[in-house]
Image (tube, grey):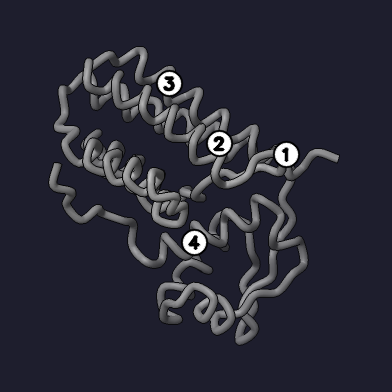
Amino acid sequence: MNLNKIKLMPAREQAASTLRKAILAKELETGATITLDEISKQLGISITPVREAFQILAGEGLIKLRPNKGAMILGINEKDIRDHYETRRILESEIIYKVCKNNSDITKVLEAFAHAQKALKSNDYSEYSKYNQSFHYEIWTAGGNDKIRSLLSSMWNGLSMGNNVGVEEYAQISMREHTQIVEALKSRDAELSKRLMSEHIMRSMENMLTHYKI
């Protein structure tokens, strides 16, 4: 198979995703201050998409913007985590159901999946993370609802790593679930696709919640 270049989300949403994940996983603690320059350098991108990412996260109530001082991390609790993933579960389950029911083109979904398989075989987990994002993004796109795609893009938080699982094990688990989802998509089994996606998102939530267990 000739693998085409995958589609990723815009830089502002990628930056927001990275920061969102760090906040959800408590890598950025409540009260901590982040600056545009600092995050720009860490992510290797210009200040403009970082500034836009800050605005996205401020709108979600995850950070408080501080004029000329960057932003402060606000508090987040277990309910916030559950609300976040429950919303993702509802939207992603419905969009994949729509993909099957409408017999939408899933060529790009399969290409992203193939890229992810290749990255995993090469033990390239950084690349796997990108293709994991693309896999979900192409499902949202195939669903044909631009509003839902936009909402899900704005909520993306990358690999939902927990305290009890390493990146290699997480990638293997994620790939097994993606494989089942792909088979359901190929057979256009709407109900099965919907259930598998729901379970996939809820498993991700449980992983993230390990950061909040005492």
The earlier-in-sequence mark between 3 and 4 is 4
The earlier-in-sequence mark between 4 and 2 is 4
Q: Mark 2 is on which residue type?
A: Tyr
Q: What whole-number distance in Å separates the C-alpha atoms at marks 1 and 4?
A: 22 Å
- Which element is circle 3 on? helix
Q: Looking at the picture, how far across and down is residue 175, in whole percent?
A: 42, 34
- Identify the residue under disc 2: 85
Q: Looking at the picture, how far across and down is residue 141, in whole percent?
A: 25, 41
Residue drawn at x 24%, y 53% is: 6
Q: What whole-number distance in Å separates the C-alpha atoms at marks 3 and 1?
A: 22 Å
Residue drawn at x 48%, y 66% is: 53
Q: What whole-number distance in Å separates the C-alpha atoms at marks 1 and 2?
A: 14 Å
Q: Nearer the viewer, mark 3 or mark 4?
A: 3
- Identify the residue under disc 1: 210
- Which element is circle 4 on? helix
Whether pointer 1 and pointer 2 mark residues with C-beta atoms closer than 8 Å, the reply is no
Q: Nearer the viewer, mark 1 or mark 4?
A: 1
Q: Mark 1 is on which residue type?
A: Thr
- Identify the residue under disc 3: 196
Q: Label for residue 16?
A: 4
Q: Mark 4 is on which residue type?
A: Ala
The earlier-in-sequence mark between 3 and 2 is 2
Whether pointer 1 and pointer 4 mark residues with C-beta atoms closer than 8 Å, the reply is no
- In which quadrant is the C terminus drawn? top right
Say which of 62 and 159 sits in front: 159
Give the residue furthest to the front: 122
User: Does residue 168 sit above or below 203 in this rendering?
Assistant: below
